[in-house]
Amino acid sequence: MEERRKILEMVRDGLISVEEAEQLLDAFAGGDGCETEKCRDKILIAKAKIEEAVKKLDESLARFGGKTGAMVEKSLQGVVEKLKNIIKEDHDE
């Protein structure tokens, strides 16, 4: 559930759109019964968007002397790992 909260916070902070959040949540939940290739594509797209959002966040906060990207990226690694497990489970079935 922490991953869901992080995604919602990213929407609130304007880092990702509602549509992007829906894609992330769908891929995370596996709720659309997607095929492995489709899930993999969703994960790659979501990962690229997360990386871009982290980069923008870093750039905007750099003037305060701190980098937040590592912290945000670490917290989102759990999301990526869970998505990988979902793909693996989907593939194993």
Image: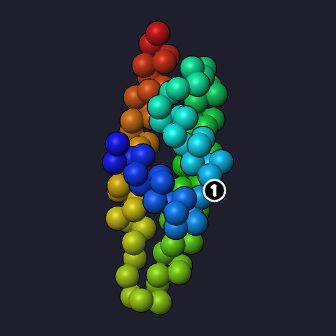
Inspect the image, locate mark 1, and give the three-letter code of the amino acid beneath it: Ser
* The N terminus, quarter of image: top left
Where is 62 relative to 13, above or below?
Answer: below
Would you say residue 44 is visible in this rendering?
A: no
The relative height of residue 32 versus residue 55 in the rendered view (above or below) is: above
- Identify whether 73 is placed above or below 21: below
Q: As displayed, is residue 39 above or below residue 16?
A: above
**Residue drawn 37% across the image and 65% down it:** 70
Residue 53 locus on image (x, y percent): 56, 64
**Mark 1, secondary structure of its residue:** loop
Q: Which residue is mark 1?
A: 17
What is the tally of numbered marks visible in this picture?
1
Q: Quadrant of residue 43?
A: top right
- Residue 4 horizontal/vertical position (percent): 42, 46
Residue 1 or 93: which is nearer the viewer?
1
Label 1 crowd (10 A; few <14 / some 14-19 / many >=20): some
Residue at (34% x, 48% y) in the render: 2
In the displayed structure image, the side of residue 38 where residue 93 appears, left or right: left
Place of residue 79 in the rendered image (x, y in percent of width and height, measured from the top left) = 41, 44
Check the image and name the residue furthest to the top: 93
Give the colouring mode of the picture.
Answer: rainbow
Residue under the image location 58 percent in, 25 percent down:
32
- Residue drawn at x 44%, y 13% is 92
Asked whether residue 32 is in view, the answer is yes
**8 with respect to 71 (left or right):** right
Judging depth in this view, the residue of 22 and 47 nearest the camera is 22
